[in-house]
Image: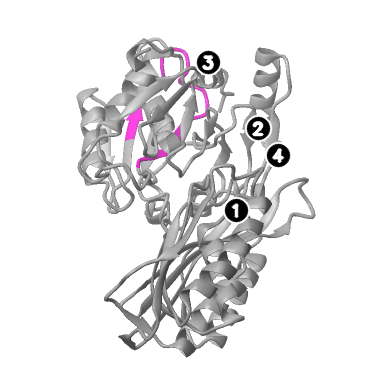
Amino acid sequence: MELSNIEPQIIWKNFSKLNAVPRPSKKEEKVIAFIKGFGENLGLETTVDEVGNVIIKKPATAGMENRKSIVLQSHLDMVCQKNNDVNFDFDTEGIKMEVDGDWVKAKGTTLGADNGLGVATIMSVLESSDIPHPALEALFTIDEETGMTGALGLKPGQLTGQILLNLDTEEDDEIDIGCAGGVDVTITQTYAAETSKGQIVRIEVKGLQGGHSGMDIHKGFGNANIILGRLLYIGLENQNIELVSIDSGGLRNAIPREGAALISVRNAQEFIENATALKKDILEEFATVEPGIQINIENSTSSDKAISEQDSKKVILTLKALHNGVYRMSPDVANLVEASNNVARVELKGGELKILNLTRSSVDSSKYSVAEQLKSVAELAGMKVEFSGSYPGWKPKPGSEIVQLMEKLYTEKFSEKPHVVACHAGLECGIIGANYPEMEMVSFGPTIRGAHSPDERANIPSAQKFWSFLKDILANIPQK
């Protein structure tokens, strides 16, 4: 089946057009121009603010002028992840998509349904001529995935809408009314690199599921960086190690799927035997949740230099000690992760070490408690630590008028109650709400699986359900 034949055709048409435009985070120039041109071609008031957010305004349809005004919001950028064996340039190529049963997916890369389906849905409302709606402001933000700088740069007074509908969640039976905040924790250090003294061994971890470092952090998925750290640590018990290089993980908001390390040891055979025994244990641990995991430990060659045994030990012990995964469950909201950390990227090259983390929490104090624990571990090893990109969470308001309306409409339409939840992902609502405290906010969306990984896929029946629900919401917005 071609995407053009899928219902609702208007959404998949716009999603296909959007996915033809490269849109990595922090490289949104092309997609900003695309959305700006889209609004202008419709004859709608279209502006681009100082940071690159696009705002398109559409008047109310006949008879809806006295309803509360709406902000429809999604972000333009996407997480760019691909399988190692896929040749693809996110800076220049459009996403290659295919239909697989009830799912739309990409060929070896992320799909961009997060948050491209939200963007395409807003485009569809803007170009429609038969959908009743109040006065609309479409807000397309930039750089949500790697810093939320678009939402952070949105100034007070740019929006006049009374209700914000954020179209950026991934379960079609959920109405989201709260989210976690986050802070980037970056660990760095520079070491002298000298000619290695021993035999070279290469360790590779691959085939993990990966996933969203907020929404999936509680699922027990393997983290390539942590598994590499375990395999390196086993060598410290029997012989010293010199680290040549580490290249593992990727973006802060993606659970690492694969990584590799080159090390120098005095006795390669002994190390491989010990690491292989641990490999067996790891494979058994993850047999259920990570059926595709692969660990390769083998002799190798390298002319690269290594850092000293003493410095290598500090790096390995740090990797072993950094907290990864759930830190605390919420005592107030059932089954909600309150605080977590994702050890997202470990890179050692030419003596330059960098470890990237994303710490999340719905409570600001516990967010910094986790971040400070990471800092304490790294500073004990003589490393430098920087906090950056902090953004607030979004406090739930379950009694708001829009939440009650959506609960009622959902129940009547689908003959079951929706799940009203808060999530552990970072949504822009908390940041926008800081400048627009009187604005009511809700987040919802179609079902998406495997976000932030090459396994990302969007459910076709769910998109139909989501589109129908959104149109009902717009038609029933209360009066001012």
Using the image as rendered, state which of residue 351 and residue 410 is in the foreground: 351
Q: How crowded is mark 1: few (under 14 residues within 10 Å), some or many (20 or more)?
A: many
Amino acid at circle 1: Ala
Q: Distance between the residues labelled 2 and 1?
A: 19 Å
Q: How crowded is mark 2: few (under 14 residues within 10 Å), some or many (20 or more)?
A: many
SS type, badge 3: helix
Whether tag 3 and tag 1 are in contact, CB under 8 A, the answer is no
In this image, 257 relative to 291: left or right? left
Residue 392 seen in this snapshot? no
Using the image as rendered, state which of residue 262 and residue 417 is in the foreground: 262
Q: How far apart are marks 3 and 1 (CA)?
A: 28 Å
Q: How far apart are marks 4 and 3 (CA)?
A: 23 Å
Q: Is residue 305 above or below residue 274?
A: below
Amino acid at circle 2: Val
User: Can you say which quadrant of the picture contains the N terminus?
Assistant: top left
User: Can you say which quadrant of the picture contains the C terminus?
Assistant: top right
Q: Where is residue 22 in the image (x, y as percent from the top left)?
A: 25, 40
Q: Look at discs 2 and 3 and give the one toward the viewer.
A: 3
